[in-house]
Amino acid sequence: MMKWAVVLCAMLALSECAFRVPLIKGKSAREALEEKGLWEKYRNAYPYNPLAKFSQSYAVGYESMTNDADLSYYGVISIGNPPQSFQVIFDSGSSNLWIPSVYCSSDACNNHARFNPQKSSTFQATNTPLAIQYGTGSMTGFLGYDTVSVGGINVPHQIFGLSQTEAPFMAHMKADGILGLAYPQLAEDHAQPVFDNMVQQGLVQQDYFSVYLSSNAQTGSEIIFGGYKTNHFTGNLVWIPLSSETYWQITMDSVTINGQVVACNGGCQAIVDTGTSLIAGPVSDINSINYYVGATVSNGDALVNCNNIGKMPQVTFNIGGHSFSLDASAYVSQSYYYGCRTGFSPSGQSLWILGDVFIRQYYTIFNRANNSVGLAKSV
Ligand SMILES: *[C@@H]1O[C@H](CO)[C@@H](O)[C@H](O)[C@H]1NC(C)=O
């Protein structure tokens, strides 16, 4: 099967040799909790910390992941033989793959799909424990190997985590697990990331993947391994070299509104992160942006009057001599329960995160061949 696919790849046009995983835009944990009237309680118990997964824990060798209640895009993979299916967040801000297992009885495991290694003829266990630090708790488990099927590519002998305990807030998330797409240096236990394994085994002809997040529709979003689609963007595709290769990290020159620098004065570092919903940055910079767009910060939310969206300014991210602008309609989200708020969130650290609010507007190609990201206006 696999060999045949690779031979086909060599014979066909490059675009034919890409493997596509549709992403579903589902209800975020926040939306689910708001509907149940539980959001305030949840928020107080698990304060939003977009950089929780980038915390000092990295320095002591812990890989970490999100507790982001606004995350809403996920896709389906399968593991084992015969295949067992899971919904995962494709996270360019971390590098491990993990899913719940039948050995886990946490709340989050009871309401998600769980992998049963005894039902897979190709599973190989290891004795290596895995612990992934969240902002507010952790996932623990152990590592094993099996065939992982992603977008029709079977990736044999892929290492992944099987959870044994999960933090309570995972129970509110739609996805079962996480598939990390950042560099191997970030992987806990040096577990080889899925994309590295795909490349090493020659399963993709191009050493890049692309992420398209559709703005409104529940469907249409996708991640393509080994290719990108020109019909997802308009205008120039701009290549930005990475400034560091752990996250997908780039240098940002400034953030401007009507030509005036309002944040990231003199330059700053940013990561392009599909696993964070908002745009996050240092507190004073984010406060400044929210001030200039006319938002009032209350209880952690930057609120705006929904009737003003048409009058609010564009916010422009200047990167590598190019400008990437967001209209208010792109950076303001509307909740039935809480009204309108901006997607600019303080992180308490110097690193900026360009999350889904940015990626929805700019189709992103994550290029491992020359360590760059390609950005182009999404359509
Ligand atoms: C990286 O590769 C792309 C396409 O493969 C190329 O167009 C681009 O110029 C390269 N970018 C950098 C920063 O080297």
Image (cartoon, rainbow, N blue to C red):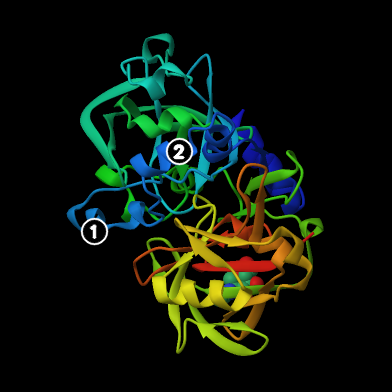
Residue 122 x %, y %: 41, 18
Residue visible at 36% across and 72% down in the picture: 350
Residue visible at 77% across and 43% down in the picture: 217
Q: Could you tell whether 119 is left or right of 129 in the image?
A: right
The mark closer to the camera, 2 or 1, is 1
Indicate whether 100 appears above or below 335.
Answer: above
Q: Which mark is residue 268?
A: none
Closer to the camera in the image, 289 or 90: 289
Residue 107 x %, y %: 37, 21
Disc 2 crowd rating (10 Å Cα; few below 14, some 14-19, many 20+) is many
**Image quadrant for the C terminus?**
bottom right
Closer to the camera in the image, 156 or 36: 36
Q: Which mark is residue 56?
A: 1
Q: Are marks 2 and 1 in contact (CB under 8 Å)?
A: no
Residue 41 x %, y %: 41, 37
Residue carrying label 2: 178
> Which circle's residue, 2 or 1, is located before the other in the chain?
1
Q: Could you tell whether 271 is left or right of 338 in the image?
A: left
Indicate whether 368 appears above or below 199.
Answer: below
Give the CA separation, mark 2 to mark 1.
21 Å
Q: Secondary structure at mark 2?
A: strand
